[in-house]
Each structure stands twice: as structure tokens, then as C-alpha cells.
Image: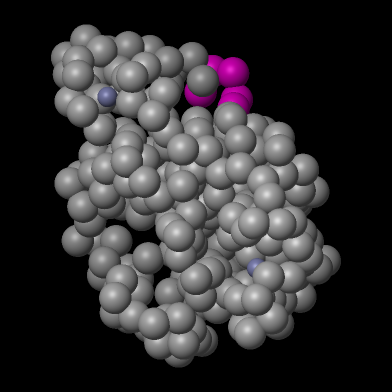
């Protein structure tokens, strides 16, 4: 096992990054990832339309419910191995458009405003975390896309909130078909035993990061692996919650 835990924000690195960002903005002025308006990656008008996740929620899976509960009907039916799953916003326009462009149109820069949304909502969830890990893509899918969007979200989110992270702490051991279009049970089967731990997680409270959470099946499969390998607890945090 190799351990390359990264601590956020060394000063010279932040300065270098700031300079690189300014240069990049000069050469390629940013446009809004949702409406294409020039000026920033997420314009004020689109940001104002973001639908934040609001209580009441199921305390475990983070699903919005009519009355706050520790275990909603879905969690009773399919108990999650995670302590909690939370998301910053609902998977609705304009967040859905930003996430689509991040994942499928090469707009990797959008990981920054999306991670900022996660950082803005983070204080509300008050989780005590020792180490943050992104949900990995299969190596072949990552090679085709050029990056793993969850790694970019993790990197930016951890820098914003000051949490330690390891980019390759988990890996996919086999190729899985995309979860879109599958039922909850099919999703669980599809990702079962699809992960391997590559970092020391013994006794640690782990936070998994992903872009979208629908049934939580991917996070559940990753969490099961981490718990078998000695993690004390596993929680999940996504940009958006699909309802
Ligand atoms: Zn916009
Ligand atoms: Zn629930």
C-alpha cells in the first residue's frame, strides 16, 4: 500500500496556481458552464437559480423527505453501509448542465465552481473526517475522458475546506456499465466488489466524493470495501442529489 496523503494549500503553490489561473483567464476568458455568458465559469444569474439541498432529510441517505427521519423507507429496504450521504444541491438546472459539461464535454474547469458549491454547503453537515477519497473511474474510462471528474472535485473541495485527501486511495478493479437507466437493485449488483483500497484507512473516518448520487449504490460498494479494509466509518458527499 502506498500513502500519498495531500494536505491542501501550500502558499507558493497557491500563488503559482493563482498566477496560472490569471494567465489562463487572459488567454481563454471564462464563460458560464450553464448559459455561456462571458465573465465567469458560473455566472451570477445561474448561481441564483441553483437549488440547494434543504432539510428535512433522511439523516442517513440524505434524501429530501417530508419529515426528518433517521432511516427513510428506502434505507429500511436497502440499508446503506455509509454513516451518511449528503449533497450540496439538487440535480436540476443549472447544476445538471454544469455536471454534464464537466463529465462529457471536457469542461474540466467546471470542477472548481462545482466544488465551491460543495464547500459552501459543507458547514451544514458537520461531519468529522480524517481522509477524503474520490470515487475512481475505471482506468480505461479515465484515459478516454482524460481525467476523473471526482478527483478534480475532491482536489478543489479539499483545498476550499482544508481537508486531507488521497487521489488514488481507491481503484476500480473491473469495468462496470454506467449506472444510468438501471434499477436500484441492478445498480447495486453492477458495482459490487468493483473497488480495491490502495491507502491505509485503518481506524479512519473516510469521506467519499462523487459528482451525482442517485441510489447511493456506487458509494455503498466503495464503502463496503473500505470498511472491510479497516475504515472506522465511511460517509459520502456529492455535488448533486438526483431525486
Ligand atoms: Zn450562466
Ligand atoms: Zn434514507
**Could you tell me if residue 167 is visible in this image?**
no
Q: Main secondary structure of the magenta part?
A: helix
Q: Give the range drawn in magenta.
A: 9-13
Indicate which quadrant contains ligand 2.
bottom right
Q: Say which of 152 and 190 sits in front.
A: 190
* Residue 70 place in picture, x, y as percent: 78, 65
Check the picture and name the quadrant holding the N terminus.
bottom right
Indicate yes or no whether the magenta region holds residue 53: no
Q: Is residue 152 above or below residue 231?
A: above
Colouring rule applied to residues: one colour
Q: Which of 146 and 98 is in front in this view?
A: 98
> Does residue 205 appear to the left or right of 112 in the view shown?
right
> Residue visible at 53% across and 69% down?
216
Q: Position of residue 233 (x, y in %)?
A: 76, 66
Residue drawn at point x = 52 percent, y = 52 percent: 238
Find residue 54 and report its image quarter. Answer: top right
The picture quadrant where one finds residue 207 is bottom right
Does residue 22 appear anywhere in the picture?
yes
In-front residue for pair 31/129: 31
Q: Nearer the viewer, residue 211 or 166?
A: 211
Q: Is residue 142 left or right of residue 5?
A: left
| x and y, in percent, of residue 177 in the image | 29, 79
| Location of residue 118 with respect to 16 vertically, above or below | below
Q: In this view, does 121 lie to the left or right of 90?
A: right
Where is the C terminus found, in terms of image quarters?
A: bottom left
Give the x, y percent position of residue 118: 54, 38
- Residue at 50% across / 71% down in the picture? 215
Residue at image x 62%, y 58%? 65
Amino acid at each position: 500500500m502506498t500513502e500519498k496523503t495531500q494536505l491542501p494549500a501550500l502558499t507558493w503553490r497557491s500563488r503559482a496556481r493563482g498566477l496560472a489561473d490569471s494567465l489562463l483567464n487572459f488567454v481563454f476568458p471564462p464563460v458560464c458552464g450553464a448559459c455561456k455568458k462571458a465573465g465567469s465559469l458560473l455566472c451570477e444569474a445561474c448561481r441564483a437559480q441553483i437549488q440547494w439541498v434543504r432539510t428535512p432529510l433522511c439523516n442517513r441517505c440524505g434524501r429530501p423527505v417530508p419529515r426528518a427521519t433517521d432511516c427513510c423507507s428506502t434505507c429500511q429496504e436497502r440499508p446503506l453501509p455509509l454513516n451518511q450521504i449528503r449533497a450540496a444541491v439538487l440535480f436540476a438546472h443549472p447544476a445538471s448542465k454544469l455536471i454534464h459539461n464537466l463529465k462529457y464535454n471536457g469542461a474540466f474547469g467546471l470542477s472548481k465552481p462545482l466544488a465551491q458549491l460543495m464547500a459552501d454547503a459543507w458547514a451544514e453537515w458537520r461531519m468529522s473526517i480524517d481522509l477524503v477519497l474520490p470515487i475512481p473511474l475505471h482506468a480505461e474510462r479515465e484515459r478516454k475522458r482524460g481525467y476523473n471528474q471526482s478527483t478534480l472535485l475532491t482536489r478543489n473541495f479539499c483545498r476550499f475546506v482544508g481537508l486531507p485527501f488521497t487521489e488514488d486511495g481507491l481503484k476500480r478493479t473491473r469495468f462496470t456499465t454506467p449506472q444510468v437507466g438501471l434499477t436500484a437493485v441492478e445498480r447495486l449488483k453492477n458495482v459490487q466488489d468493483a473497488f480495491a483500497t490502495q491507502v491505509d484507512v485503518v481506524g479512519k473516518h473516510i469521506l467519499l466524493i462523487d459528482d451525482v448520487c442517485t441510489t447511493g449504490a456506487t458509494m455503498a460498494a466503495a464503502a463496503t470495501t473500505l470498511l472491510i479494509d479497516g475504515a472506522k466509518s465511511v460517509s459520502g458527499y456529492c455535488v448533486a442529489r438526483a431525486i
